[in-house]
Image: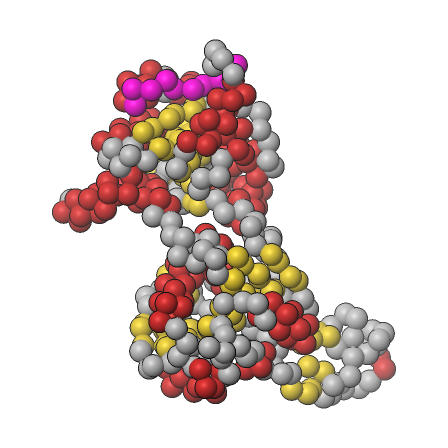
Amino acid sequence: MWRFRYVWDNIEAMIRNKTVLLGVTGSIAAYKAVDLASKLVQAGANVDVVMTRCATEFVTPLSFTSITHRPTVTDMFEVPDDFEIEHIALAQRANVVVIAPATANIIARLAAGIADDMLTCAVLATRAPVILAPAMNVNMWENRITQENLTRLRARGFKMVEPVTGPLACGSQGKGRLADVEDILTVISQALRAKTDLAGKRVVVSAGGTQEPIDPVRYVGNRSSGKMGFALAEAARDRAAEVTLITAPTALDDPIGVTVVRVDTTLQMRDAIARAAARADVLIMAAAPADFRPAAVSGSKIKKESTARMDLHLVPNPDIISEVRGNLIKVGFAAESEDLVRNATAKLKKKSLDLIVANNITEAQSGFGTDTNKVTLIDSRGKIEALPLLPKSEVAHKVLDKVVALLSAGPTNQGRNGRRK
Ligand code: PMT
């Protein structure tokens, strides 16, 4: 209770006088949206409610109107004048859009870009951050189609308040209950707090593990999924930077609002980074470029019958980040399995970096392929900050907080980094 009082003060400060477009869709959890609308109003927000037709089967529009003292919109064609203008007006005046509860159906329609009612039209037309708080049966939540739709929406910048595990209205048990209203309020206030502290800055981010061909079928590679680099690119974009993401092969969709350059090998990544870094203010290397490549690449598939054993002769690849010179902040990552701080600090110095993100890849849920990461930030002045296990999106913002501080402090590695004044 006391903790929520403290959190509530922060939420209230962010939400006051803001316009929140609350979308309500057809789920039994729709009644909780009434509580959410009420808390938003108590915090001083102007709340526009748009209900889908199915939502009105669960809760009446009058419930929302009574709380918000504004008309609740249920149908595009009900609005007397200029209905086309109305959804644009709703979209434009919103500082944030939140859909709670968000059904599997609305998630699928948004992922497909469908705009066939007031809510989907408004979401498509808004430039405000959009938050989804899903609620549904556990099997619908776990269905790969739903998860693929959510992945697509996340890549397009939608924010999520994940459902929680517990007894569901359908009688089953599992993940699918609408998140607590307090948690939804917290994410709304975070979205409203969005920073623009990288406006005017060009940020280059690398992601993924490069693949070094042996023949047209096989390659030497590593386990990087690209998630950390993509999270950094999205976070920098959300803070108003102009972002170029140079990525080795990944299964991830291109984030919107980011220039994406896809490469395969370390040599290709080096060329792409050299070009982009020449006009950049910041370079963040979260990629895991292969340190070695086969000395010779076979033009045709090597037949296993043609040789009793296969010896790979590898030659070293260039160290990309060490080669980059110029008036920019350089941030490296260090994937370490032992002596984290010592090894990362040695890399920071050897590669003339401003900051290194020491990544303990032996920790559970940390490092390659995970959605979370446990890192320690070490700057060139020797300041060390160990972070707890966090979602990669939050790690990205912590790294960018440091980058913003470094940008305002000015160059720290002038000599070694060959910076211009
Ligand atoms: O992609 P994910 O699945 O989300 O996983 C994230 C991650 C574990 C890959 C990421 O957090 C990470 O630690 N990336 C760095 C991996 C790595 O190559 O570490 P390193 O210690 O070998 O290299 C140190 C730094 O030099 C890195 O910034 C690296 O990008 C850079 N480097 C490495 C080799 C090379 N030839 N050129 C480079 O510039």
For residue 46, say whether it is visible: yes
Q: In the displayed structure, does residue 59 sit left or right of residue 243?
A: left
Front-lying residue, 117 or 219:
117
Q: Find residue 196 and report its horizontal and vertical position in percent.
A: 41, 53
Q: Find residue 87 and report its horizontal and vertical position in percent.
A: 49, 25
The question of residue 72 being in magenta is answered with yes
Please give the name of the residue rendered at 39% of the width and 30% of the height, measured from the top-left corner. Answer: 22
In this rendering, the answer to whether 233 lies above or below 314 is above
The question of residue 70 being in magenta is answered with yes
Q: Find residue 139 and report its horizontal and vertical position in percent.
A: 49, 40
Front-lying residue, 248 or 313:
248
| Quadrant where the image shows the N terminus | top left
Please give the name of the residue rendered at 37% of the width and 67% of the height, measured from the top-left corner. Answer: 408
The magenta stretch is 68-77
Q: Find residue 118 and report its horizontal and vertical position in percent.
A: 50, 24
Q: Quadrant of residue 182?
A: top left
**Most common SS among magenta residues:** loop
Q: Quadrant of residue 44?
A: top left
Please give the name of the residue rendered at 16% of the width and 44% of the height, measured from the top-left corner. Answer: 5
